[in-house]
Image (tube, rainbow, N blue to C red):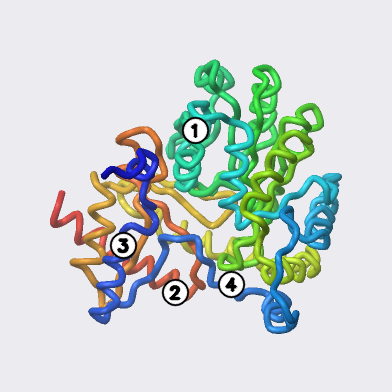
Amino acid sequence: MDISKRGQEIQPSPIRKLKPYADEALERGIHVYFLNIGQPDIPTPQPIMDAFHNYNEKVLSYGPAQGFLELRQAIAGYFRSYDIPIDSENVVITIGGSEAIHFSFSAVADPGDEIIIPEPFYTNYNGYAAFASVKIVPLTLRVEDGFRLPPTEEIEARITPRTRAILLCSPNNPTGTVYTPEELERVTAVVKKHDLFLIGDEVYKEFVYDGGTHKSVLEYEEIKERVIVVDSISKRFSSCGARVGAVITWNEDVYQAVLKFAQARLCPPSVEQKAALAAYQMGLDYFQPVKEEYQKRRDVLFDGLKDIPGIVIHKPQGAFYIIVRLPIKDCEHFVQWMLTDFHHNQETVMVAPAQGFYCTPGRGKDEVRIAYVLKEEDLKRAIVVFKEGLRKYQSLFL
């Protein structure tokens, strides 16, 4: 008896699939520096934890399918603080940013339709495209170019009669690239010309470095009805386990479609929404020291890696990831070997092979994504161990 084609073909997580090797290393007494996954070690803000501890309702009952009004109002207020005039009726609360992606894909595209996404991209886009039976059309970017968007003609060359949307993630996971206003204007002109939707994954919008600022796709009035933003508290408030996200749109048809999807799964989690409300009530001052911490970590990682002979590396402008090209042929083998056959003073490092962040076969085999989510002391030590492992691997396999 066969399971569905969807179940057979969905991509396993390249971030998690090597985790069993890390678990085995831990059992052998090896300390593993986990730089493979975007799990910050920044403490979750105390108001969020207090909201969990102080929840004392007698019955944990269903909430509204679109989420509690107070939380939707708080998220709308958050965007208005950036002069983006969102109202609570433009917000649907989702079970994490992941469900927001799933809902957005399903709202704009039918089975067999296409969504253009610059690659490398957040690997779970593949999974949610599989759920929705949607085809991702990759727009391949290059580490040599700092993963900048290509000219308009190259974007338009990917458009077919089945294209329904373009998705942009900025600040980008996995590259750390922040798209410039000129790049965004290039894409907004394309979606307007070709009658497409523009999905903006903006979950890292607070983390832009070197004095830069984030520009939301919601700021482009000329495509107001075409824009859908995917959002989440996971990284913004170091609350990955709370699983609270949102779909934000001015398009009433999209909103109603997403609302019906939300009704089908009943409601997002109640206690977590109360915690998310507490997070948004902290105000924007919370973000400055957090951003400074991530920028410091970014600098430590970049400065620690840039002198590796043969590496191709560009300094990220945002988020907390970097993709680098290493002077080896098979990074997945290297990452596995680091966990199974290598340690330096009983320590090793786990990063993510970048091949799984590409849709185009063969791309990214010599690249890795590194998440700078550990405190400076641990990150510096991890760099030493990583470089020693790379040196030894090269001596054995090159």
Judged from this view, the residue extending furthest toward the left is 396
Q: CA distance from mark 2 to mark 4?
A: 13 Å
Q: Quadrant of the N terminus?
A: top left
Q: Earlier in the sequence, mark 1 or mark 2?
A: 1
Q: CA distance from mark 1 to mark 2?
A: 41 Å
Q: Earlier in the sequence, mark 4 or mark 1?
A: 4
Q: Secondary structure at mark 2?
A: helix
**Mark identifier at residue 42:** 4
Q: 59 or 120: which is nearer to us?
A: 59
In the rendered image, which quarter is residue 261 located in?
top right
What residue does disc 1 label? 134
Is the residue 356 above or below the residue 75 in the image?
A: above
| Disc 2: CA contacts within 10 A as few (<14), some (14-19) or many (>=20) | few
Q: Earlier in the sequence, mark 3 or mark 4?
A: 4
Report the mark closest to the observer, 3 or 4: 4
Res 208 seen here: no
